[in-house]
Image (cartoon, rainbow, N blue to C red):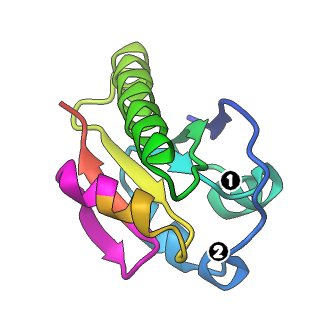
Amino acid sequence: MQTRLYTPVDAPMLKALLNGKLGDVTEGRDVIVVSQLGEEDLIGALAFRPVFLVHELSIGRTPLGRMVASELITYALATARGLALQFGIDHPEALFVVDKENDTLRRLVLERGAREEEPGTLYTMRIR
């Protein structure tokens, strides 16, 4: 299975992370990526891995921004669930790639039961 990208994203960042750590986390796992990373960065980091990018998550630091982010996480997980069914992934996980400065998004994914893979940046969550 090859990498499939859904919805282009545009926040280029975390170059050092892409030099191995993201690949280490996804190695041998069926992971659906929810990211703020630039599309070209993800293609290089995740080439030839069964990984899906489902949605860009970018929010402000306001109550409205938090509500929008929560809805985007819900949408991303629903989309990821559909992709897992479509491609026959038995134990899917969502991998959230979060800007280290985005405390709101980090708190939201942790509240939803995500596990921290790389402090402040990578979080995985079982898709039920």
Q: Mark 1 Cα within 10 Å, few/some/many (few <14, many 20+)? A: few
Query: Residue 116 location in percent, x, y?
Result: 28, 71
Q: Nearer the viewer, residue 86 or 97?
A: 97
Amino acid beneath label 1:
Ala
Please state which of the two labelled residues, at mark 1 or mark 2, is closer to the viewer.
2
Q: Residues within 10 Å of mark 2 (few under 14, many from 20)?
A: some
Residue 10 vs residue 83: left or right? right
Which residue is painted at 24% across and 36% down in the image?
127
On the image, the x and y values in percent for residue 36 come to 63, 55
Which amino acid, mark 2? Leu
Kind of element beneath mark 1: loop
Quadrant the N terminus occupies: top right
Q: Quadrant of residue 28?
A: bottom left
Residue 23's disc is none
The residue identified by callout 2 is: 18
* Residue 97 position (above or below residue 73): below
Q: Is residue 104 above or below residue 6?
A: below
Q: Is residue 5 above or below residue 16?
A: above
Magenta segment range? Answer: 108-122
Q: Quadrant of the C terminus?
A: top left
The reply, left or right, for residue 104 in relation to residue 22 is left
Residue 43 left/right relative to 94: right
Residue displayed at 50% across by 53% down:
62
Q: Which residue is mark 1?
A: 47
Q: Is residue 67 magenta?
A: no
Q: Position of residue 107 (x, y in %)?
A: 31, 62
How far across and down, in percent of the image, does residue 74 sit?
35, 30
